Each structure stands twice: as structure tokens, then as C-alpha cells.
């Protein structure tokens, strides 16, 4: 099996590449390195520095390798940035994914795993959220992901491209070896912000709102360890190899934690005091996002293995000695 991983130098992609590489599965990374890190790609894995917007170069790369499947992570993923600059998001995410899918058709690649998001449910009607819940994207980032999901469905009908869409809840934590991890600039995500505050590189954590209808007034999210996400991608490939039909799966643990609980758990694990301050709500934040993960469990045979303590301790381990 020869796999192409786009965005394999990014946070989620690089963890998946490490899982494949550790299992001696043949993998090639394609990344434009605009936001990814060369150091996140193992030295024995080929890195093709290609931009998905450069169709000719992309097509030639796919022709050169004869891939069995594509796992597509490459995307911009900052909600706030997408609101301010939709051009960037529609161009990079939608046009880039379109080019990739077109190149798959041209090169007869029929298996595709796509990195999607729970944010396309918008403000969910009920929680936990199952895949049958109505999609209602409330920002351009989520819109781009939904457009690509719809494109996949059309490509299956017309060209027989079989796909698995994985809608992630909150990807968090880092590889337990400390060799790779999350490194965003700027860093918008709660757990690295909390850890960096504990380590003294940030002054305080701003808690975006404490008047939500949740257990303690702060937002509740379903944090899923990055290697559990990686494991689901591997199972998605196995599912497609067994001729599974195109399908969509939510990936979360099914457990929700509030912002306050994250800070408390991090204080316990690091044994450090974390300064916090209540700030106004962040626009577009639903009160609670928790996955119903039954479908992934049943059809992909996937069960998340890592709990919140492991998520936070692996993040602490990485951020203490960050390599890039
Ligand atoms: N959050 C916060 N302060 C921060 C960053 C995030 O209170 O500095 C909250 C945010 O409102 C959300 C949760 O933490 O409820 C997780 O946010 P993150 O940006 O990590 O992921 P998202 O849920 O937006 O994908």
C-alpha cells in the first residue's frame, strides 16, 4: 500500500505520518510548508514540497508514484482568520482540494480519506452530536469543509471515488515520545495556551465567557488525543481497502470538559499555578460540542484510548522541550 498524505508536515498530518511510518507503511508527504514544519516529517519519509494550487506539479507528482490512496489534511484551519479573509480559505481549501480530487481522477486513485470538522454542525440542536444531525456551518472555514464533503459525494457518483470523511472534535495532545507536536503561530487552541501559561511563556489564560448554559458556565468541548485521531485514519484506510462504501464519521471521545476543567487538570498535572481571567465570549463559539462516536466504533472498529490526563501530560511533555 502506498499512501499520499497531504499536509503531512502539519499538526494532525505529521502524527498520522509517524503512525504509518512506525508500521513500515509506504508513505509520501505532500506539503507546501506554508504552515507545516519540515522537522515534523520523519527523515526516512519523502517530502514533496508542492502547493495544491499548482495543478501541473501536483498532477506530475501523483503520476510519479502510483498511490493506492490519499489522506488529505492540507488546509487552513483558523476560524477567525477565515471570517476576516474568506478569499484565502476558499482558494486554499476549496480550490486546493478540487485540484487534488481532479488529479486523483486523472491518476485513477479511488480511495480518499478527508479531514473534516465538527464545526460544520454550527450550533447543534442536540448533544451528543451524531452524523445525522443537520449541518449548518457558521463561518467560512466550516463552509469550505462542507463544500469539499459535497464535492466528494459528487466524485463518488460520477467517478467511483470511495471516501471516508472524518469530522474531528477538538484534536489535542502530542505524541508521547515528545519528538513531534503542535506548533501553530499564532496559537489559538486552548490546551497549548494553558500549558504555555503554566510554563510561563504566556501571562494568563483568557476564559472566553463564563455565562454559558454548561456545568460551570464555561464552554464544553470533546478533546480527542491526536494519536487516537491517527488510529481512526488507519482504520478508515482499512475500511476502504475492504471495499467499504463512502461514509462520514464523527471522531470524539463522547466526554465533554469545560474550559475551567481543562485549566484545573493542567494545574494538577504540571503542579504549577495557571493564572486565568474571565473575558468576553468569542464570537461563533457554541456552548457545548460533544461527539456521538457510536458509528465510528461500530463501522470502523475504532475506540479512543487516551483520556484527558494523557492528552494534557503529552502536551506538557512536548511544550517543555519543543523541537520546532
Ligand atoms: N478558549 C478559551 N480561551 C482561549 C482559547 C480557547 O476560553 O484562549 C475556549 C474556546 O472558547 C472554546 C474552547 O476553549 O470553548 C476550545 O477552543 P479551541 O480554540 O481550542 O478549539 P475550538 O473549540 O474553537 O475548535
Image (tube, helix red, strand yellow):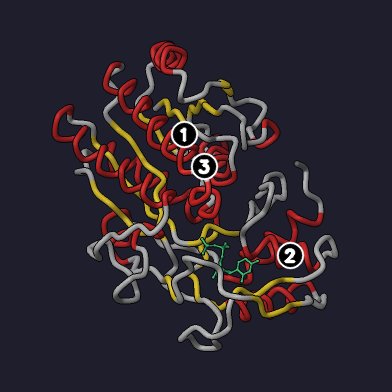
Q: Nearer the viewer, residue 6 or 21?
A: 6
| Circles 1, 3 touching at the beta carbon (< 8 Å) | yes
User: Disc 2 to disc 1, how far (Cα)?
Assistant: 30 Å
Q: Quadrant of residue 196?
A: bottom right
Q: Which mark is residue 76?
A: 3
User: Disc 1 to disc 3, how far (Cα)?
Assistant: 7 Å
Q: Which residue is the extreme one toward the left?
A: 157
Q: Give the answer, above or below, for where 273 lies relative to 103.
A: below
Q: Which residue is the extreme one toward the right?
A: 200
Task: Indicate the secondary structure of the residue bearing disc 1.
Answer: helix
Q: Is 200 left, or right, of 126 in this rendering? A: right
Instruction: Quickly name the residue at label 2.
Output: 195
Q: Nearer the viewer, residue 292 or 202?
A: 202
Q: Which mark is residue 283?
A: none
Instruction: Quickly name the residue at label 1.
Output: 92
Local crowd at mark 2 within 10 Å, few (<14), some, or many (≥20)? many
User: Disc 3 to disc 2, how far (Cα)?
Assistant: 23 Å
| Circles 3, 2 touching at the beta carbon (< 8 Å) | no
Local crowd at mark 3 within 10 Å, few (<14), some, or many (≥20)? some
Q: Nearer the viewer, residue 203 or 229?
A: 203
Residue 80, percent from left and from top? 54, 54
Q: Nearer the viewer, residue 214 or 273?
A: 214
Residue 271, percent from left and from top? 81, 76
Q: Earlier in the sequence, mark 2 or mark 1?
A: 1
Q: Identify the residue at horizontal 33%, vertical 70% (top origin).
A: 124
Q: Earlier in the sequence, mark 3 or mark 2?
A: 3
Q: Is 288 left, or right, of 134 in this rendering? A: right
Q: Is mark 3 within 8 Å of ligand 1?
A: no
Q: Which residue is the extreme one toward the front?
A: 84
Amino acid at each position: 500500500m502506498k499512501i499520499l498524505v497531504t499536509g503531512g508536515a502539519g499538526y494532525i498530518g505529521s502524527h498520522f505520518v509517524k503512525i504509518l511510518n512506525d508500521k513500515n507503511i509506504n508513505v509520501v508527504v505532500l506539503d507546501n510548508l506554508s504552515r507545516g514544519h519540515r522537522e515534523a516529517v520523519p527523515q526516512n519519509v519523502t517530502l514533496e514540497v508542492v502547493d495544491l494550487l499548482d495543478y501541473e506539479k501536483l498532477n506530475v507528482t501523483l503520476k510519479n508514484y502510483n498511490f493506492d490512496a490519499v489522506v488529505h489534511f492540507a488546509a487552513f484551519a483558523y476560524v477567525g482568520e477565515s471570517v476576516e479573509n474568506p478569499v484565502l480559505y476558499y482558494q486554499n481549501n476549496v480550490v486546493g482540494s478540487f485540484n487534488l480530487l481532479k488529479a486523483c481522477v486523472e491518476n485513477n486513485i479511488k480511495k480518499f480519506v478527508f479531514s473534516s470538522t465538527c464545526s460544520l454542525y454550527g450550533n447543534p440542536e442536540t448533544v451528543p452530536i451524531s452524523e445525522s444531525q443537520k449541518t449548518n456551518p457558521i463561518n467560512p472555514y466550516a463552509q469550505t469543509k462542507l463544500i469539499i464533503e459535497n464535492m466528494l459525494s459528487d466524485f463518488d457518483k460520477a467517478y467511483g471515488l470511495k471516501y471516508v470523511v472524518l469530522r474531528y472534535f477538538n484534536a489535542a495532545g502530542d505524541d508521547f515520545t515528545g519528538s513531534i507536536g503542535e506548533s501553530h503561530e499564532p496559537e489559538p487552541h486552548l490546551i497549548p495556551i494553558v500549558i504555555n501559561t503554566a510554563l510561563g511563556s504566556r501571562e494568563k489564560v483568557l476564559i472566553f465567557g463564563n455565562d454559558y448554559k454548561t456545568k460551570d458556565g464555561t464552554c464544553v468541548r470533546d478533546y480527542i488525543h491526536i494519536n487516537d485521531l491517527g488510529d481512526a485514519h488507519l482504520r478508515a484506510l482499512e475500511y476502504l481497502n475492504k471495499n467499504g462504501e463512502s461514509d462520514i464519521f464523527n471522531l470524539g471521545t463522547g466526554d465533554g470538559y469545560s474550559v475551567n476543567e481543562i485549566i484545573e487538570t493542567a494545574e494538577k498535572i504540571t503542579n504549577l499555578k495557571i493564572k486565568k481571567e474571565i473575558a468576553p465570549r468569542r464570537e461563533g463559539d457554541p456552548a457545548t460540542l460533544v461527539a456521538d462516536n457510536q458509528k465510528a466504533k461500530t463501522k470502523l472498529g475504532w475506540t479512543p484510548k487516551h483520556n484527558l490526563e494523557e492528552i494534557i501530560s503529552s502536551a506538557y511533555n512536548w511544550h517543555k522541550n519543543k523541537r520546532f
